[in-house]
Image (cartoon, rainbow, N blue to C red):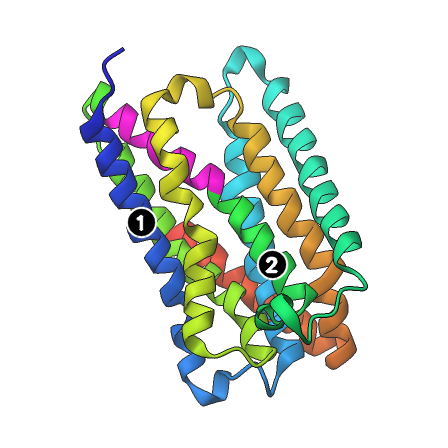
Amino acid sequence: MNIPWDIVGDSVVAGLLASLACGFGVAPLLLRRLDPTRHIGVGYGFAGGLMVSASVYNLIYPGLTGGQADMRFAPVLGVTFGILAGALLIWAVDRWLRGKDFESGSWSGFGGRASILIFLAMSVHSIPEGVAVGVGYASQAMYDNELGLYIALAIGIHNVPEGLAVAIPLRAAGARLPWCFLAAFLTSLPQPIAAIPASIASWLFRPIMPIMMGFAAGAMIFLVLLELIPDALSRTTAAVNAWAFTLGFCLMLLIQVLL
């Protein structure tokens, strides 16, 4: 098989640009009024809304609608299995992290258990996005369309608020903005990496995309319910937290609709 290196190169570049967009999601934190260190509860609720909205509309819905008509139940089963597996991963990591000392040693720069879990969940979430970019560029070459470019652009735009969701807990824990930018960028780094094998053998990834999308969505939703919402409720009122969550959800939804 002749490896389409030009397609691989295009998908990697597109994935890297989308990763940088995720890093630039920290830009709103430059405004002092949006400093989550003073409004940690609101920030957690807002980040939770962003992540749940991204899970539903960027992962679960495409995973359910991407299957063949004669296999209508296969995507549902795949997404469901993936959601449960993703939730299991975050649950297991959370149990392992409990009792760790985050104030000293190699853990001190991560901002606590919540920040580590968010970093892990968002990194997992980036893998199917990278696969989608690779598959899109392979389809672009085979069918002479602009699917790869469109997918990369859409992912890059919605990566911006996702980067903010990663940065909020880090900033609230006292991390500096350069570290917030780096952390947000690193969570999206799996995108260009996953795009490489996907663009080479796109046919291999299509059947398992519902599972991968469900896995990433399950990890993020479980994380929001396990960590972000309880922390937000312990720091602010239920009404304020509900509004913050709703605004975050609507912001990501608006981005999806506009694309």
Residue depicted at 50% across the width and 35% down the height? 62
In screen coordinates, is 14 left or right of 211? left
Q: In the image, residue 170 lies at what x, y percent?
A: 56, 72
Extreme front residue here? 105
* Amino acid beneath label 1: Leu
Q: Quadrant of residue 87?
A: top right
**Residue ID for mark 2:** 118
Residue depicted at 74% across the width and 41% down the height? 88
Q: Are marks 1 and 2 in contact (CB under 8 Å)?
A: no
Please identify the quadrant where the N terminus is shown: top left
In screen coordinates, is 40 left or right of 2? right
Identify the magenta region. 127-140
Q: Quadrant of residue 144?
A: top left
Q: On residue 16, which mark appears?
A: 1
Q: On residue 76, which mark appears?
A: none
Q: In terms of secondary structure, where does tag 2 sit?
A: helix
Instruction: Tell me which secondary structure the magenta stretch mostly adopts.
Output: helix
Q: In the image, residue 251 lies at what x, y percent?
A: 48, 63
Choose between 243 and 105: the one closer to the eye: 105
Residue depicted at 74% across the width and 71% down the height? 231
Local crowd size for mark 2, using a 10 Å CA cut-off: few (<14), some (14–19), many (≥20)? many
Q: In the image, residue 128 lies at what x, y percent?
A: 48, 37
Q: Earlier in the sequence, mark 1 or mark 2?
A: 1
Residue depicted at 33% across the width and 58% down the height? 20
Q: Is residue 138 magenta?
A: yes
